[in-house]
Image (cartoon, rainbow, N blue to C red):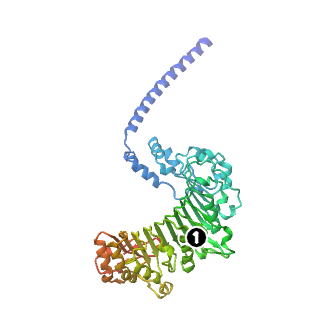
Amino acid sequence: MTIAAALRAQVSDLNSAISRQERILDDMRSRLQDLQSQLESIAYPILTLPPEMTSEIFIHCLPSKRYMGVVNTDEAPLLLTHVCRVWRQIAISTPALWATFDIDDMWRLPRLAEIAQTWFKLLQLNVEDFEDANTHLVESSVFTMLQKLSIEIDNNRKNSDAVVIFNNVPLLHEVIMIAVAPSFAVLPWQQLTKFTGEVYEVKECIEAIRLMPNLLECVFSAFWRDDGDANRFGTVSHPNMQHFTLSELSESTLYRPYRPFSIKILTLVTFPSLETLKISEMDNFGAEEAEALDSFLQRSSPPLRKLAVHPFEGEVELRLSPPFMALIGLVELEIWRPARNFLSSFLTGFGCDPNLLPQLQNLTLGCHIPEDEEYYMRFKDGPDFEEILRDAAEPVTKRREILPGCAQLQSFRVISEKLCVGAWYSEENLLPFRKLKESGMYVHIGTETRSVLQVSRPYNVTRMISFSMNTHRRLSL
């Protein structure tokens, strides 16, 4: 056989072998297609759930704390988009999964800018590492869907350059700044309607209020630097403020010259449109605080509809002053641990004076029960649980029956931070409130989570132990 003939024979053999392998491959492809069709026809239990239920499960998959403090592809929601087509579509269609975009140490995620660009429905942003933010996210168009921004920074980064990456945020309306002065970020302050400043000096609170002329709701957790006259900050009038919440840091967390006296803010501001005022977590609400509140009410003459005063400890020494009496539009009043003198005068007038808060419909009184000598000494000037019930029964009943010229009282609550184990509560004191409850009025007497009116009479709390409200924990035996 010639060389050419031999080569032609080898080529023929290889072509035949290739044809055989192609027939085998075609057969394998056909079998694979059949198997794939069978596989796709199987209804996996997880895929039979309604999309709404799967969406709710996905929300519970969100990590409580991000690994390394930044969004990444190994955690929800990004991880959920890589499982299957159905899950990807459900995840993308669930806005709550994309509501928070966490950024801490951005150098750990080189593709952060790319991920941010593709993040579906970016609604809220938490930023801690601002030096990296300015570096990696220079394209402000990333945040065109941003509605809520939370900023926190630790002490060793407070000398960083100001954040300038949020220039183009047309939908941003709420900002939370934790231990970060307003001057630290360049924001479209004029469009903001809700602001929270935590761990703020009084002067930083005033600065923030001045920056946001369209602010409707504001929350401050503040402290006072006791190093001079507050008037050096000047006063500010804000015509649009409607809801204002003020709390202060515990004295144990501060050091001189700082002290917990955030109520000082009320001597520096005027809110003529204010509808809700909440004052909470203060170490004390004494005569000086009451004077600051009176001064604010007199200066602002606000159409206040809700007033809540809840100090961390001590009694609330409010006064039936002209500014307080002028709150003719007040609908809801909540006072924790009112001083005995104030409460006695208030309840006496409440039952017979149509000029005392004539539109009040919801009244809450918080109190204590002196269960030991130390507790009693701390709150000896305040009425206890039974005393409030005795004094409030008649005036509350009169307001429910509609005092001429007054709105009908719709709800009455007496809330205790704890109930004495083994204590009996007089049915004589509870009976008027049982009758009010039977008449259709909302009446709650007990802890936040348990009313003594819900059980058979007479009531004994041996079976219930309630821990302090401040820990938000309850144990029922």
Q: Is residue 467 above or below residue 173?
A: below
Residue 193 position within the rendered picture, expressed as x and y whole percent measured from the top left: 55, 56
Quadrant for residue 357, please give it: bottom left
Q: Is residue 161 above or below residue 26?
A: below
Q: How many marks?
A: 1
Q: Residue furthest bottom?
A: 373
> Dividing the image into 4 quarters, which one contains the C terminus?
bottom left
The one of 320 and 53 positioned closer to us in this rendering: 320
Q: Taking 32 as reference, is 300 left or right?
A: right
Residue 254 position within the rendered picture, expressed as x and y whole percent measured from the top left: 63, 74
Residue 343 position within the rendered picture, expressed as x and y whole percent measured from the top left: 44, 80
Quadrant for residue 212, please give it: bottom right
Residue 448 visible to the viewer: no
The one of 459 and 212 positioned closer to us in this rendering: 212
Q: Taking 428 as reference, is 380 left or right?
A: right
Residue 259 position within the rendered picture, expressed as x and y whole percent measured from the top left: 63, 75
> Dividing the image into 4 quarters, which one contains the N terminus?
top right
Residue 202 visible to the viewer: yes
Residue type at tag 1 = Leu
Q: Which residue is mark 1?
A: 266
Q: Residue at x 44, y 84 (%)?
A: 370
Q: Taking 367 as reference, is 146 left or right?
A: right
Q: Secondary structure at mark 1?
A: helix
For disc 1, the neighbor class at 10 Å (few under 14, some 14 to 19, many from 20) is: many
Quadrant for residue 441, please give it: bottom left
